[in-house]
Amino acid sequence: MKTAIFAFLFLGLSVSMLAQNDAGSSRITDKNGISWMTYVGTHRFAKQFEFYTELSLRRGDGLQKNQQTILRLGGNWRPVPNLLFHLGYANARFGNIGDYPEYPVNGGLKENRVYEQVNYRTMIDFLEIQHRFRLEQRWMQETPAYGKGNSPEGFYQNRARYMFRLNCPISGKTIDDGEFYVSAWDEFMLNFGPNVESNFFDQNRLGLLVGYRFHKDFMIEAGYINQLLEQGTLVQNKPVYQINQGLITSITYNFDFRD
């Protein structure tokens, strides 16, 4: 099992770093620095039911440009402690970073998204292992970057996502209040369905983090993120791969309205 875990993380790192080697004339690579900041809150109002909130600010080019701003709202059902079903809505605004901006009209692209998610958590000795499966239905504003004009109807796409995450205590066998821990995760995303003509691979994200748990409802994390992103448009008839690297920070603060 340990061999499989390390093999998976090595695969994620390999995919994330793939485009960093020059591929000659087959594609264009665009390297950028990024900084992602996220707040997450899970707010319990019944034994098995929770309300979920998330705000992510994702910046590029030394915090000067908006890469993505996203707000998520949703509901959780936990039939058992280690299994979670989630239904959510996201509103996103995409900006332009790098040398080959994908959304040159009106400063970016707008998206409304509905998604379904399953989380499963298990323990192997001192390692906490998390799996997250997500399906997204995405309605996006059309721009000339997609060759479809400025029609207000926008266009629709589906996306599938899978995240694998490891949490490991620095001292002891469990992550307790007042202790540091380390985390590693990899997430792979694929486009499918209508309006997906070429870029079935969407992106891969890899994170390496250090966290601190104040108590069970309050944690902070910071570390390194690597994002390999295939843009949906061609430049000089070549695909463009963004290689974005930088700092990711997150704050988790949960409320229990039953108290």
Image (cartoon, rainbow, N blue to C red):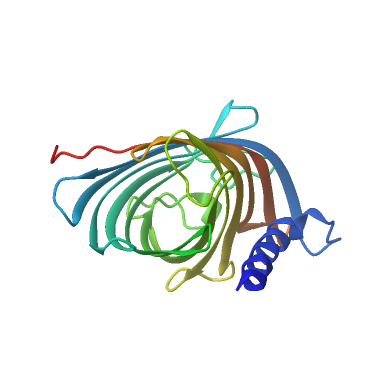
Where's residue 242, x and y in %?
Answer: 67, 50
In terms of image quadrants, where is residue 59? Answer: top right
| Residue at x-position 67% and y-position 72% | 3
Quadrant position of the N terminus in the picture: bottom right
Q: How many labels does the image show?
A: 0
Q: In this view, does 145 lie to the left or right of 42?
A: right
Where's residue 109, x and y in %?
Answer: 45, 45
| Residue at x-position 46% and y-position 68% | 195
Q: Nearer the viewer, residue 66 or 196?
A: 66
Residue sitting farthest toward the front: 172
In terms of image quadrants, where is residue 97? Answer: top right
Q: Is residue 224 visible?
A: yes
Q: In this view, does 4 lie to the left or right of 106?
A: right
Quadrant position of the C terminus in the picture: top left
Where's residue 17, x and y in %?
Answer: 74, 56
In terms of image quadrants, where is residue 224? Answer: top right
Q: Nearer the viewer, residue 256 or 226?
A: 256
| Residue at x-position 83% and y-position 61% | 23
Where's residue 77, x and y in %?
Answer: 22, 60
Q: Is residue 250 visible?
A: no
